[in-house]
Image: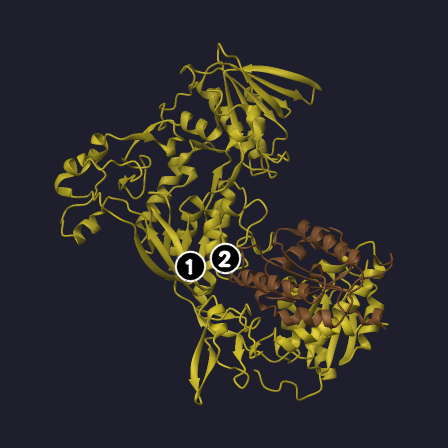
Amino acid sequence: MADENWKPKILAIICNWCSYAGADLAGGSRIQYPPDIRAIRVMCTGRIDPLFILKAFQDGADGVLVSGCHFGDCHYLEGNYKAAKRMFLLKTVLKNIGFEDKRLRMTFVSASEGAKWATVIEDVVKTIKDLGPSPLNKEIAR
Amino acid sequence: MAEVKTKEEPRIGVFVCHCGTNIAGSVDVKAVVEYARKLPNVAVADDYQYMCSTPGQNKIRDAIKEHNLTGVVVAACSPRLHEPTFRGATKMGGLNPFRFEMANIREQNSWVHMHQPEEATAKAKDAIRIAVAKAALLEDLVPKSVPVEKAAMVVGGGVGGMQAALDLANAGIKTYLVEKNPTIGGRMSQLDKTFPTLDCSQCILTPKMVDVYRNENIELLTYTEVEAVEGYIGNFDVTLRKKARGVLTTEEAEARGYVGGGCNGCGDCEGVCPVIKPNPFEVGMAPRKAIYIYHPQVSPLLYTVDFDACVKCGLCVDICGDKKAIDLNATDEFMNVKVGTVILATGYDIFPIEEKTEWGYKRYDNVITSLEFERLICASGPTGGHLVRPSDGETPKRIGFVLCAGSRDNTGVGKPYCSRFCCMYSLKHAHQIIEKIPGAVPYIFYMDIRSFGKMYEEFYYRIQNEGAKFIRGRVANILEDPVTKNLHVNAEDTLLGRPVDVEVDLVVLAAAIQPSAETERTRRLFGVSCSQDGWLLEAHPKLNPCGTTTAGVYLAGVCQGPKDIPDTVAQAEGAASAASIPIHLGEVELEPYFAQCIEEKCAGCGLCVNLCPYSALALVEKDGRRVMQVTEAKCKGCGTCGGFCPGGAIWMQHFATPQIIAQIDAFLLGGEE
């Protein structure tokens, strides 16, 4: 458990059609949530190469959130299924090399789920705060 | 393309928007601009009250020229809102519009961290740093123009779908109107009168049905469902399932060589059919044969065999005789149509109000829904327009109307939204019983009367003056007197502040509405999102209520959310107008987020080929080896191939791997001390 003032670095890679729109809706509805996430927009979670996530962890990210459309709702039919398969695999890999797989999370937030987006962020931030800084975090290692 | 991209040193301009106090209220804009100035590759950083205004856009245009910029970053609202605006400004300055990147510091920052100015400012700095890193690697892209098929499709043949189809057809566009039922007309054909004018619903609807049937530009496809959809705006390839109808039209009969044959709607078949089942058009209150027409005013006038009920006795075939209109061995047929744009008008169903057990629907005989009331009061209905109590056939004198039955209901059983037309039709029902039944008293239990439309409030006054009793309070429960089958409506009269128990002869529940059963399947076929309640999601709730996030697909009527007939027709006309634009333009531009193969890295493994949901990728022989090739017109830019290529040989335009890695690095490695 890290100290109270520790600000985790959490990367979110989110799809344009569902989760990014859901995050926009949370904003439009002025739903407040923790400010510890930085988001990168891609058109579809299917675009996410597992290497992006490994790169983020290598760079010292304390957590990575991948968020896309609900199953069956993908703007590109099935990109989210493929992303989910990759994330499952990646989580297994992370676990096997002794890295807490909880630092990687995949969620499904639709364009109408602004409130859910806020809940997801709260939950992700809490999870990462409970885990503390990433073992790969260079600042801590130094 | 994929080769070496940046010969020149990147020179990025950063423009931070105050958005009045929307952003500046939480984010220290001046500090953010100061920070941006020091970032690598940033040539100029500036701020303005409203970047989207003309002076704001001019700032971008002028800075591009003055500082010879290679890329532009605007930190403002969501790219989903203003990306097209700022791409335009970038273009005005002489840069390729795809050299623009947006940092969202409003929807995903200032608005969600309103009371955390320090954190919001730090987050804005990070967002700009991330955007600058991407902007430095952006490349010139050219949108791809594709031709638009000069035809449209409307799914759903209710009043909204009919209006949309008529407008498209009258604008000279070939229109396929697809309806799952054997006739067009939709819910409106089940209604007796319409508020507030008290027009007879069928009287104003049937001329439209005839117009649709006769319009040369409309191909009416009743008893037909959408089976599969492929393609994109301009080029939708839709597979339709023509359900087995068992009855031939004159044309179909002639095609089989039965000249002069085919169904003429005489109805002899119905007379001899021995099978009886409940008629869904009459909400189950009247019988229907296994060969039937939906209601007397159907269009087209063509019988339909209900193959779920038919026993194939053949009596109908015999009596049909030489017309040879009936084919009991018919099977579903499939057809393909190509259209440029699509309008969804899939309508609504009634919420199963028996789930609100406290009101006793389906337990007490004399509790009915308002749709059942419509059929009972309608002259063409099962009782010839005489309102009766289901328990004993007597004429009810005291009638309770329970409004918001399942609407505005946060108990988890009903629907949280307002169904929007129940107040008004219940007022109309009250008027109808006062008019038809001497001495009848309507008791209207309401939460609020929402009479928002033109002449609606006046109609409300009229009904008040006609003697309807209004009790403001939600009905707690309804209990049946087991002997008389009368009902005790228990509610709190919140104006008098006391509980009331009103004994009535009949209760009419103004049941909530919900998306029609087929909505979910249809929207997934067309790739349209839905809101939490299942209504189809419009592109923007205020500024694009007819569009969807799928280009070329538009919405009309209740499928987008509860609305009454005038609003449905208005939206249908809006959707038809929107759907006709790409067709009249003749071509549309697709965003150039295509995959490209970096051939020197491609090993020809073909993993990507199977990943592509659009069959846009293929392996081809080139210089003696296999490499992947993209068909740009088929590629929609999801990047699923690029996310998996083991060799990193796929270059996703505008979302290329080096660009995304640069964003990740900028966030995690490039921060402040």
Give the secondary structure at mark 2: loop
Label 2 resides on the chain identified as: B
Residue B265 vertical placement versus B473 (above, below): below
Give the secondary structure at mark 1: strand
Label 1 resides on the chain identified as: B
* Contact between labelled residues 1 and 2, with CB atoms less than 8 Å apart: yes
The amino acid sitting under disc 2 is Gly
Residue B526's x, y, as percent? 47, 57
Q: Quadrant of the N terminus of chain A?
A: bottom right
Please name the color used to draw chain A.
Answer: brown
Residue B512 vertical placement versus B445 (above, below): below
Q: Is residue B524 left or right of residue B40?
A: left
Residue B664's x, y, as percent? 71, 71
Q: Quadrant of the C terminus of chain A?
A: bottom right
**Which is nearer the eye, B360 or A70?**
A70
| Label of residue B527 in the image | 2
* Mark closer to the chain start, 2 or 1: 1
| Label of residue B88 in the image | none
Residue A68's x, y, as percent? 61, 59
**Which is nearer the eye, B213 or B661?**
B661
Residue under label 1, please give it: B229
Q: Is residue B45 left or right of residue B601?
A: right
Residue B127 vertical placement versus B450 (above, below): below
Task: Tell me if mark 1 has few (under 14), some (14-19) or many (20+) residues whose alpha carbon lies within 10 angstroms of its own.
Answer: some
> What residue is rendered at 69% in x and 23% in y?
B494
Task: Tell me if mark 2 has few (under 14), some (14-19) or many (20+) residues whose alpha carbon lies within 10 angstroms of its own.
Answer: many
The amino acid sitting under disc 1 is Val
Please name the color used to draw chain B.
Answer: yellow
Residue B242's x, y, as percent? 32, 51
> What residue is rendered at 18% in x and 54% in y?
B255
Disc count in the image? 2
